[in-house]
């Protein structure tokens, strides 16, 4: 049995015994076989000493058990690393950010404590998955939707705390913003409720978010400040209808007017699903097209002439590619808008949207049939489920072994910078990242389009392969680090990253000599004096470990 | 010159000298005449020793000056109390929460640093008022709206940090939620930027809210943790049209179906302005009706029969009042919905809304003419300006001296509990508060309707008069305290309160032996070790003052 750094085997054994007393022997895991399950299968350190490992895992089922674990950890200075379900592959999975932590696995805390149709809200424990809540709602025929990420196997609480996103209306697809009220076990074992939950017997814990006095909820997202044991969410009332419709434009420079119109429509609440961008001419599928083509894993080969024109376009000669588009009907850009609401409203919203886009010469429109909800079983066969609040694992088929993909990668790590919501930023970011790819000897990405998970900002999401070859992984990690710095030099920062890169990303958020990080550290030292909770998560280290980090960095 | 508690006159003189060096002699105020301007004119302690007083005031004009002031305050242990413009009358005004503080008056920091039409956002300093920003936008013809509170003379930053609200779409009328990015001078004088602003040269400070790692912005609202020197906001793109329409229902028990339908429509994004409730039969005007009747200060006297029937209804006999309504056409309830968007969309939204309300027997509808925006000068004469993002001081005419109000009160203090978004809660709260008014010898409020500033919750806002008679004020303060406890016993908490009651309100947010307050105090002690910033604000006291508070609390 390996012990956490700086913890003697006797102290660790004592801590394990106390964990066993708290939760029962069968829910404390120390064998290598059991702990293998907590490895990050997508770790970019696979097979290297830096791969994060857990010294043990413990799976409580009540808040009191969580408190007992935290108190025992304080007594023996054993570091803990809570996970909800540990399903955020590509962002760290279930492995701790700091090797030697005891993983606190909250999967057994899977109670759905309330779902209110009238208030369109729920209160859940961290082990509740999107599938769990979806089934609960379906079984009862409640007319509310959960906004789900893609894939949907993870925990609502875990995804929201990692600040993940989904596909429906903006205020729901931002999963952390959609929350209302937390219950947290603090690093000292104390139980705290936020928002109106701090008032005993509160009637509005899931109805009013910020409570009275400083609003501390944000502190517990992407954080090492507490273990969230209950979390409320606002749900989306099931809409009457759904309309998906696509704007098609033929020229490269149409992107300027397209993004401007899109922003106006989205910021004005006129289109309200996640906009979905594609470029048939550049060979970039939108998410909806991915979903539609999933059954058709053997993609048709593309016209060699088109491939050649794409290469030309990459060097600045866009006109031949545009001409190819005019001849064949392939669009340069596709913007798929989605509308949720009463049938008459969504039709009017699309009509108005068309007017806005009509300033673009030659713009075309394609409208899917309006869907009256709920979906029929037949309709379910041809849609992207997360658009309808239905969790699915279909996303995994994208990288799967197939006729056209004989050697799928082992896994991936996500590089995900936020850039401005403008065409200029999209073009600039593509130039910058293409140059960086050449410089760092990465496969040069063909033109990339950003995602629109967040209002007002674009997000680029690049999947770096994780392989079983150490040399390749080392090269990719080095390139990842360089991309973080390249992005930062252009004013773009990542919104989330895997533990392997959390120090590096936090280090570029360096305004005024890292004032924000130093603030985090001051808070951390105050509320976690023994330094037992999630050391290193999002680059925040406990007092006694900061010296080590600074030494290693310097 | 009075000095702050525990600060000797020499130390205070030295601090004043350093303030003068930082900002210039003419911007440090120590004369009684000048300091009178920082008194809370609505203080419930008028003429009593407990009235809060400032030992001095200082008005910096740059971030560096704010930092110099904070550093000097640390050196001399002088408590500071920052205000943006100090206009939140009824919630404390410009007076400090703790007597003897030096008010840091940020009114001179009134730069509008950016307004982006494309991103529909702005970045402003704390001295920028709603009028300032509105004029800036109008002068440039930008197609964005600022959501304004009523009245609109205050600061965007101050109102948002106090978690104030307005009238347009939900994501804008919640002023703190509408912010994107902060710059803060911490209690130790360090400058920090939150969100993407922590990345030097960030391109998305006003485009993406939460940045990387723990999201700390909420900490600085209703707080004593820092002085906000810049704040970004998302603005509302100017809508194409506005429609206001009213649902009228005749029976007391129709409120159940009305609220349920309203919630469904608002949570579904189908109605998107602040709903506005009234009851002609009970004599409760909606906000829109107030606005319309403002010129007509001499209200017509009400029918004595109606007044008598209202008394009966208060004892449970609703049917005679309902019958009066059927005979005269007066509605029991009016729900005015507001719709912002393209003309076709808002018409479709109202059509759908009518269908939802049509389950109520005998329901009627009244539709105002659709307004195509911007407003004409003539249209401006007959509307409630804040619905259109136009700041105004008209609200003050409500309590003004008039034919029917010969003796207006001196001021008021707001008691503002949050209750659930249900008819049951409205009826229950009315019973509870009426009983409390009788018990505490307050004027028994006729039936009260809540406001809908916040999504998913109702808020009751009762204005307690502040008079120039000390005995009356004492009685009202005692009643206010009792109402806080009465509300808490029913699971309802205030969302905001004046300094006079901040300890009392915070004390009912007591889950797990005041775990939340103890957490706040731990953070406070860590980031403000010399205890110089806003002692007592929202019930959070510095380490060296907590003993005093606890002793006084008994």
Image (spheres, coloured by chain):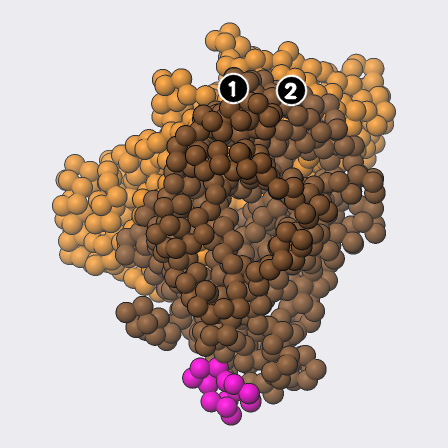
Chain colours: A orange, B brown
Percent position of residue B438, x then y: 37, 50
**Among numbered discs 1 and 2, the one appearing first in the sequence:** 2
Is A487 left, or right, of B116 in this rendering? left
Q: Can residue A198 be seen?
A: no
Q: Which mark is residue B500?
A: none
Task: Judge whether A149 appears above or below B94 on screen.
Answer: above
Q: Which mark is residue B351?
A: 2
Residue A276 in which image quadrant: top right
Percent position of residue B160, x then y: 58, 54
The furthest residue to the top? A378
Which structural element holds mark 2? helix
Which mark's residue is nearer the viewer, 1 or 2? Answer: 1
Judging depth in this view, the residue of B195 and B340 nearest the camera is B340
Task: Judge whether A259 appears above or below B211 on screen.
Answer: above
Q: Is residue A39 magenta?
A: no
Kindly report the secondary structure that dominates the magenta region of the rendered protein.
Answer: loop
The crowd level at tag 1 (other Cα within 10 Å; few <14, some 14-19, many 20+) is: some
Distance from the alpha carbon under mark 1 to that under mark 2:
15 Å
The crowd level at tag 2 (other Cα within 10 Å; few <14, some 14-19, many 20+) is: some
Query: Which residue does the image show at 62% across and 13% down from the upper left?
Result: A370
Residue A391 in which image quadrant: top left
The residue carrying mark 1 is B360
Query: Which residue does the image show at 40% across and 50% down from the upper left?
Result: B437
Percent position of residue B228, x then y: 58, 62
Is B334 left, or right, of B381 in this rendering? left
Magenta segment, which residues? B1-13
Residue A250 in which image quadrant: top right
Chain containing the residue with disc 2: B
Judging depth in this view, the residue of B292 and A118 nearest the camera is B292
């Amino acid at each position: 049995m390996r012990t956490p750094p700086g913890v003697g085997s006797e102290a660790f054994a004592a801590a394990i015994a106390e964990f066993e007393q708290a939760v029962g022997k069968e829910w404390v895991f120390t064998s290598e076989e059991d702990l293998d399950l907590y490895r990050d299968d997508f770790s970019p350190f696979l097979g290297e000493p830096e791969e994060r490992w857990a010294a043990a895992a413990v799976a409580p089922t009540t808040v009191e058990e969580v408190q007992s674990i935290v108190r025992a950890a304080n007594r023996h200075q054993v570091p803990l690393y809570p996970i909800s379900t540990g399903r955020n592959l590509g962002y760290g999975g279930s492995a701790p950010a700091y090797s030697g932590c005891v993983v606190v696995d909250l999967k057994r805390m899977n109670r759905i404590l309330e779902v209110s149709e009238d208030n369109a809200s729920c209160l859940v424990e961290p082990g509740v998955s999107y599938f769990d809540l979806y089934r609960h709602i379906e079984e009862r025929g409640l007319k509310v939707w959960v906004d789900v990420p893609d894939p949907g196997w993870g925990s609502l609480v875990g995804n929201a705390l990692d600040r993940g996103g989904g596909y429906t209306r903006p205020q729901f697809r931002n999963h952390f913003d959609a929350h209302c009220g937390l219950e947290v076990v603090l690093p000292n074992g104390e139980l705290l409720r936020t928002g109106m939950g701090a008032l005993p017997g509160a009637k509005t814990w899931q109805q009013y978010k910020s409570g009275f006095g400083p609003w501390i909820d944000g502190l517990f997202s992407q954080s090492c400040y507490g273990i969230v044991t209950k979390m409320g969410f606002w749900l989306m009332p099931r809409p009457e209808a759904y309309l998906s419709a696509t704007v098609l434009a033929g020229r490269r420079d149409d992107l300027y007017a397209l993004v401007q119109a899109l922003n106006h429509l989205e910021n004005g609440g006129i289109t309200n699903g996640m906009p979905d961008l594609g470029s048939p001419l550049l060979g970039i599928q939108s998410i909806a097209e991915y979903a539609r083509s999933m059954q058709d894993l053997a993609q048709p080969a593309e016209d060699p002439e088109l491939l050649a024109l794409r290469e030309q376009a990459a060097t600045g000669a866009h006109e031949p590619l545009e001409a190819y588009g005019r001849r064949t009907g392939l669009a340069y850009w596709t913007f798929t808008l989605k509308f949720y609401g009463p049938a008459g409203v969504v039709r009017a919203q699309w009509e108005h949207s068309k007017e806005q886009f009509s300033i673009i010469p030659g713009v075309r429109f394609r409208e899917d049939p309006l869907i009256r909800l709920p979906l029929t079983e037949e309709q379910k066969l041809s849609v992207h489920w997360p658009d309808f609040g239905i969790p699915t694992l279909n996303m995994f088929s994208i990288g799967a072994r197939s006729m056209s993909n004989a050697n799928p990668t082992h896994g991936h790590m996500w590089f995900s910078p936020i850039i401005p919501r403008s065409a200029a930023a999209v073009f600039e970011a593509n130039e910058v990242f293409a140059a960086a790819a050449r410089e760092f000897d990465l496969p040069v990405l063909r033109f990339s389009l950003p995602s629109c998970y967040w209002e007002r900002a674009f997000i680029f999401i690049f999947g770096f392969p994780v392989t079983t070859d150490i040399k390749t992984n080392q090269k990719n990690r080095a390139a990842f680090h360089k991309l973080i710095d390249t992005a930062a030099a252009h004013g773009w920062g990542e919104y989330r990253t895997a533990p392997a890169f959390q120090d590096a990303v936090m280090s570029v958020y360096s305004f005024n000599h890292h004032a924000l990080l130093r603030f985090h550290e001051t808070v951390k030292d105050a509320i976690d004096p023994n330094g037992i909770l999630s050391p290193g998560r999002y680059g925040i280290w406990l007092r006694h470990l900061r010296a080590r980090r600074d030494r290693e960095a310097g």
